Image: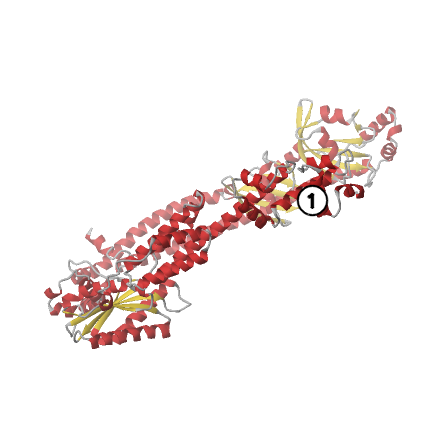
């Protein structure tokens, strides 16, 4: 087992032993491969010879059948040109039975020695008479009783074969039942008179026995183990020696040339297909022979040869292994001495390479370890400082030599922390967003280290934040001014040269390394005021540490104002009040927490307004805007102000839309009420206002605004139009018409009618 373990060390390495073994196996397999090549060459020659033999056989079949079919066509020509037949064809309506019987005797004189011809018939289409050398009958009796076709109905036979023009047409073999006998027949059809294309008066039909053709084919040498198909020029099978003509469907489309051969797999069997095309009639003769029949002797020899080959290969493998192992033993002993009990490390091609790499790896191991430690120093330093500023490490308990090993060295005793917040990324348009973030942080880190020099360290803490630890000589105003100037210079260079905008939060200066956590906390609190100060600002913790900012001004009266303005869709006044609220509160130096409270109070007012909408509209507005999620993500007061304004603006638009729809619907209802009650002489502004529960003055103003016409004028207009419809009826008096349209007497109608139409109702009646 130890030997095999040595061979597989390192996974799939090629050892010297494997190379030796492969060399011996190649010498063994070379003659085997040559033998296999020669064997398959012989097999291909035998297949080629079989194809040539099949081609010759098919040519013999084609010659025999072409001659026999030529005899059929000669018989057809002789009968078709018979003078008596042509005379009978032209005068079918005047032919007596005696003349038909006389022509039957005439047909007996055409008896042929061709064994393939079963019988022949002449059909007169006008008189529906069918004659043969033995009988006279009609088409129905013949095809339905005397010779019934198994797969063709009487109508199909008459439509496709016994009518229309046919010139030496052959129809595929079909089973025909004659009394108690059955026989497969190929049908030959020639239309009569011969050569006539348009005026067809009958056909000559010759039945060719398929049985006789099959007997001839089976006598041909080489056919006993195969199948022959005979197809016409349209690749339709005329007959075959197989009972299953469906096999030809897969082969027919492959017969593209006049002659050839190819291999075809059918039902799991390999077949050799050979075919030729007759030059006389364009028919294709196809031979299908199982490949195993052609190669039966070759396969027998192949079985013996394969058995002997396998035995030889097995013996050769054993001998090759013995020789390779014998020559490999000295090398194996050297490898065991070099590596001892240790497993080999690294990749090697063979045992010699293993020995060389083992020596080299031991020499370079120490230098490699030193290089790895130096490469990881920045990561170790960043991780340590991050834990230090978060208060997770006791700085006073760390020896100086450990700080030096991590690359951390502070020359001065005073510290401050600067947080850089990225507001806008660098403007490199060809880069994706992730790449822009990486480039932006890289630029800020390198520029910060260059500006602050050896007095601090810069490293990343979040995707959009970096920290600069600054080392100072003392806690003084000059140091704070220096910090401010460096921060402004950093912001200016980043904005002008790279399009990067940042906000800077600066802690106070504290003494001692153990105060770094406090410095970090102060800079975080200062950065929160970016919401109040806005982006691209510099915020000192010293400036905001005494800011109480615990209150904001949003009285109930102001909320009522906003509610009233919004319900009336008056966004202009809503916006004015919101601007005033934010202006008054920002001047009070709010804390970030208080600014959030103010925004949620304003959001609460917006939610109250949503209750005035329908349930579906309220739900849709909340799902569309997701207000609480949007407000929580705002990072500045200006952003909060714009988001809240947009919410109130969309609400006012929705109110305007609802008001417009309701006003139009009310106007249509009032107009419909007037058109239904115009005949009532009590119809007035007061009656309509009472019906709709509205103030009369408001109703009058509303109707004029919506329809562009006074309510009283609209009532008069409706009554006049109705009066104009009634005036042509002279059975009605003017007073009766006035009563029907809602006037107490004719005076009111006449006055209003003349004012609107320029004539009195009586004059209007005369004119029209």
Q: Position of residue 117 (x, y in %)?
A: 72, 33
Q: Position of residue 501 (x, y in %)?
A: 35, 69
Image-quadrant location for residue 10: bottom left
Q: At 75% from the left edge and 46% from the top edge, which residue is drawn? A: 759
Q: Is residue 462 above or below residue 313?
A: below
| 563, 540: nearer the viewer | 563
| 373, 363: nearer the viewer | 373
| Mark 1 closeness class: few <14, some 14–19, many ≥20 residues within 10 Å | some
Colour logic: secondary structure
Which residue extends farthest top?
180
Q: Position of residue 47 (x, y in %)?
A: 53, 48
User: Under tag 1, what secondary structure?
Assistant: helix
Determine whether, in the image, residue 509 is placed left or right of residue 696.
left
Determine whether, in the image, residue 411 is placed left or right of residue 451.
left
Determine whether, in the image, residue 726 is placed left or right of residue 655.
right
Residue denoted by label 1:
752
Q: Position of residue 620 (x, y in %)?
A: 43, 47
Determine whether, in the image, residue 133 is placed left or right of residue 525.
right
For the C terminus, the quadrant is: top right
């Amino acid at each position: 087992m130890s030997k095999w373990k040595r061979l597989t060390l390192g996974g799939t390495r090629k050892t010297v032993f494997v190379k030796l073994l492969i060399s011996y196996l190649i010498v063994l397999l070379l003659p085997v491969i040559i033998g296999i090549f020669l064997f398959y060459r012989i097999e291909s020659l035998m297949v080629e010879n079989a194809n040539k033999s099949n081609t010759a056989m098919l040519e013999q079949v084609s010659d025999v059948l072409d001659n026999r079919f030529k005899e059929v066509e000669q018989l057809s020509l002789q009968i078709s040109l018979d003078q008596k037949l042509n005379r009978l064809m032209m005068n079918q309506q005047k032919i007596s039975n005696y003349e038909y019987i006389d022509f039957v005797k005439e047909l007996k004189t055409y008896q042929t020695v061709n064994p393939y011809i079963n019988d022949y018939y002449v059909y007169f289409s006008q008189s529906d008479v069918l004659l043969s050398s033995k009988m006279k009958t009609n088409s129905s009796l013949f095809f339905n009783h005397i010779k019934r076709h198994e797969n063709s109905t009487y109508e199909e036979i008459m439509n496709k074969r016994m009518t229309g023009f046919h010139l030496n047409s052959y129809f595929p073999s079909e089973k025909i039942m004659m009394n108690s006998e059955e026989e497969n027949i190929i049908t030959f059809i020639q239309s009569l008179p011969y050569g006539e294309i348009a005026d067809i008066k009958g056909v000559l039909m010759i039945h060719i026995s398929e049985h006789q053709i099959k007997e001839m084919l089976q006598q041909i040498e080489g056919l006993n183990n195969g199948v022959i198909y005979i197809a016409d020029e349209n690749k339709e099978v005329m007959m075959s020696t197989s009972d299953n003509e469906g096999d030809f469907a897969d082969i027919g489309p492959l017969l593209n040339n006049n002659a050839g051969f190819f291999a075809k797999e059918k039902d799991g069997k390999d077949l050799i297909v050979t075919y030729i095309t007759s030059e006389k009639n364009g028919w294709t003769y196809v031979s299908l022979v199982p490949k195993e029949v052609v190669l039966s002797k070759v396969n027998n020899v192949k079985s013996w040869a394969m058995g002997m080959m396998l035995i030889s290969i097995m013996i050769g493998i054993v001998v090759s292994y013995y020789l390779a192992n014998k020559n490999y033993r000295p090398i194996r002993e050297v490898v065991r001495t070099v590596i001892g009990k240790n497993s080999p490390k690294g990749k090697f091609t063979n045992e010699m390479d293993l020995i060389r790499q083992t020596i080299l790896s031991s020499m370079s191991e120490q230098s490699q370890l030193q290089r790895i430690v130096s490469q990881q120093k920045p990561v170790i330093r960043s991780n340590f400082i991050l834990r230090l500023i978060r208060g997770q490490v006791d700085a006073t308990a760390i020896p100086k030599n450990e700080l030096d090993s991590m690359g951390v060295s502070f020359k001065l005793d005073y510290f401050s922390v600067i947080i850089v917040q990225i507001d806008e990324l660098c403007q490199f348009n060809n880069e994706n967003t992730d790449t822009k973030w990486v480039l932006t942080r890289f630029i800020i880190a390198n520029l910060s280290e260059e500006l602050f020099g050896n007095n601090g360290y810069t490293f990343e803490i979040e995707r959009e934040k970096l920290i600069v630890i600054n080392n100072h000589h003392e806690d003084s105003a000059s140091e704070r001014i220096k910090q401010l100037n460096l921060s402004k210079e950093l912001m200016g260079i980043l904005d002008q040269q790279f399009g990067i905008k940042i906000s800077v939060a600066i802690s106070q200066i504290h003494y001692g390394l153990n105060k770094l956590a406090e410095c970090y906390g102060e800079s975080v609190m200062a950065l929160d005021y970016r919401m109040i100060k806005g982006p691209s600002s510099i915020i000192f913790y010293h400036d905001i540490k005494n800011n109480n900012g615990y209150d904001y001004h949003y009285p109930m009266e102001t909320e009522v104002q906003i509610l009233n303005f919004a319900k009336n869709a008056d966004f202009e006044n809503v916006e004015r009040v919101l601007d005033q609220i934010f202006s008054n509160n920002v001047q009070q130096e709010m804390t970030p927490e208080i600014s959030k409270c103010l925004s949620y109070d304003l959001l609460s007012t917006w939610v109250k307004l949503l209750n005035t909408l329908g349930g579906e509209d309220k739900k849709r507005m909340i799902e569309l805007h997701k207000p609480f999620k949007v407000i929580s993500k705002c990072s500045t007061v200006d952003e909060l102000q714009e988001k809240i304004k947009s919410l109130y603006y969309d609400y006012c638009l929705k109110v305007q839309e609802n008001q417009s729809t309701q006003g139009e619907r009310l106007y249509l209802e009032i107009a419909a009420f007037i058109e239904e009650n115009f005949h009532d002489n009590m119809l007035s502004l007061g009656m309509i206002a009472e019906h709709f529960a509205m103030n009369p003055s408001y109703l009058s103003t509303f109707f004029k605004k919506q329809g562009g016409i006074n309510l009283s004028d609209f009532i008069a207009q409706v009554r006049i139009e109705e009066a104009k419809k009634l005036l042509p009826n002279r059975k009605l008096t003017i007073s009766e018409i006035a009563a029907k349209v809602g006037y107490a007497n004719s005076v009111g109608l006449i006055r209003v009618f003349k004012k609107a139409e320029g004539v009195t109702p009586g004059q209007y009646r005369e004119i029209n």
